[in-house]
Every structure is written in structure tokens, then in C-alpha cells.
Image (cartoon, grey):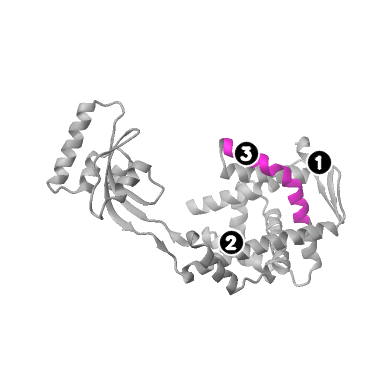
Amino acid sequence: MKKRSAILAFLLVFFGGLFLFGQEVIEEIVAVVNDDIITLSQFKAEHEDFYRALSAQYKGEEFGKVYAAMKENLLDKMITDLLLLQEAEKMEGINPDEQLRLWLENLKKENNINSDAELIRALQQQGIDFEEWKKRMRENMMREAVIYSEVRGNIVVDDSEIVNYYKLHPEEFTELPEYKLRAIYLSAEGGNEEDLEAKKREISEKISSGEDMGSLAGEYSEGPEKDNQGELGSFKKGELEKDLEQAVEKLNVGEMTPWLKVQAGWFLLKLEERKESRLKSFEEARKEIEEKFFNEKSQKKLEAFLKELKEKSHIKILIPNPLDHI
């Protein structure tokens, strides 16, 4: 049930802005794109969709920066989407109905939904019209089919490119040392310094006498690791505070640091496992390099394709700043 709610919430975030019931339709024309138009009501709905998607990913000041950077390109994105849809309608063999059917069946299976009627009710509870939502999904698949046909389906990455890149950029495929740690943390805030020193000595003496550090962490530690018997997890080189990392680097597996002072307290760390730095083999790195080249070539070719598509199309923008009308 939690998974179902999460996926339906995702659908609301990314598509709800277009399909909320009871929208007022304002048919002012923002742009003409060949034989189609983009209306102000469509732009407002797309903006709401876009705003919801960003607000689900970013918060506070970060949201403001990302929104400011991306909102000016919203109309251009709508024009591009419409051009791709127009191309899909002209191309033979693009019919995503079966792909959409299989996608819907998989969606229902993942969410334990037994029928279309149940899916429709679930979407309606989120304010989403099923038919409009399905139409949007179908159009997205049509656009993706155009991009695959005109761009991605023709990309070739030569083996020589992959081999040369691996040889010239070993730093990108070198795994950093990794440390698996257990810890006892004592807070220095609001307590008596003498009591704190006494507790540190007591723990150290118990460890020296052979008591298990995990058990002692569960008893004494004052951080979140207390509930896991001191397990801190694994850290790659550069992820720990500098002083802690320098102390851990000197340890052999099974050894412990002395008590280490941090801003708000003291740590006692035990190195439970160490993975040394190593260069990935070519076979391990091959897929990563291939994807890198494929994505770079795809992006370059996509930009050229979209530029050519816009140049040969009739595009007239009637409201240059539709954001001013929201």
C-alpha cells in the first residue's frame, strides 16, 4: 500500500497540474507552431506541472535558484515538445498503443491494482483525469520514438574511443580507499567535564579488559549509532572529517583510535574493514565509458536535430513573456 501511494503521488506531481478537474480555460494564444497553437491556459497548466515537479525535488533557497534558472525556458520546451509530436504524427510506424498498454499493465502490477477501473478511481482521488493522463503518456512515448529514430538509434561508439579514454583518464576509474567503522560517541554539550572524562576512562578500561565495543556502544554511545551497536557504516576517503580520517588511516583492521575531539563531543573509532584504492579493470569501466560517449553524442546530435527542426518550421510567438500573465 505504501508503494502504491508513493507511485500515485509521483504521478500527481508530474501530471496533476495538467489534469485537475474544474480548470478555467483561457484561450489566449501564446504561440503558433506550424498548424498548432499553444494557449495561455496550456502554458499555465504546464507551469503548474513544472512548479510541482521542482518543489518535490528541491526546497528553500535551492528551489528558488533552480526555478529561476529553468522557468525562462518553459515556453521553448513546450514548442519543442509540440514539434516532436508533429514529427511523430508524420512518421510511419510510430504507434505506441501496445507500449502504453504494457506500461499500464506493469504499473497496475507494481501497485497491486487489479483493473483499469481501480486505477481510474485511484487517479481520480488525486484529481487526475485518466483519459487525459493516458493521452499525455502516449504523446511522451511518441516524442521518445522520434528521438530514438532520428538521434539515438544512429549513435555508434567505437571500441577505439573507449580504450583510449580508459588509458588517458585512469583517475576517473580509480576507487578511493573505503573504511567501515564502529564508534562510540560522547557529547560534550551541557555536561560536566569531569564526568565526561570519567566516562571516557570507564569505557576505555572496559575495552582493555576485553568487553565488546558494540555492546558498549549500545550502552554508552550518545549518537544515532547507539541503536546499531555503534555501526557507522562505510566511508570513502574524503568523506570523514579530516582529523577523524587521519586517525583512521593509521589503523589496521580491528584496531581503535584514541578518543578524538570533534566540535560537539568525542569519538572512539574502530576500523572493522578496509578496502584499498584500486584501478577498475577495463571490462569494469567499459560500460561506464560507453554510456558517457553515447550520452555526449546523443546530446550533440539532438541539439542539431532540434535546431534544424525549428529552422524549417513556422513558429510565431505572440506572447513573448507568458510568465507575466500568471
Q: In which quarter of the view is residue 263 placed?
A: top left
Residue extending farthest to the bottom is 159
State the image coordinates of residue 29 (x, y, percent, origin top left): 85, 45
* Residue 1 seen from this side: no
Residue at 73 percent of width and 67 percent of height: 150
Magenta segment boundaries in residue numbering = 61-82
Badge 2 amino acid: Ser
Residue at 48 percent of width and 59 percent of height: 171
- Label 2 and label 1: CA atoms lie apart by 35 Å
Q: Which mark is residue 65?
A: 3
Look at discs 2 and 1 and give the one toward the viewer. Answer: 1
Q: In which quarter of the view is residue 152 placed?
A: bottom right
Q: Magenta segment: does it hold 68?
A: yes
Q: Mark 3 or mark 2, which is nearer the start of the sequence?
A: 3
State the image coordinates of residue 15 (x, y, percent, origin top left): 65, 50
Instruction: Answer left or right for 128 relative to 26.
Output: left
Q: How many marks?
A: 3
Q: Magenta segment: does it hold 232?
A: no
Q: Residues within 10 Å of mark 3 (few under 14, many from 20)?
A: few
Depth order, front residue of 7/200: 200
State the image coordinates of residue 199 (x, y, percent, origin top left): 19, 34
Provide the secondary structure element on which disc 1 rests: loop
Q: Mark 1 or mark 3, which is nearer the start of the sequence?
A: 1
Q: Residues within 10 Å of mark 2 (few under 14, many from 20)?
A: few
* Residue 208 seen from this side: yes
What residue would you read off at disc 2? 115
Look at discs 2 and 3 and give the one toward the viewer. Answer: 3
What residue would you read off at disc 1? 26
Depth order, front residue of 322/293: 293
Residue at 14 percent of width and 45 percent of height: 208
Provide the secondary structure element on which disc 2 rests: loop
Look at discs 3 and 1 and give the one toward the viewer. Answer: 3
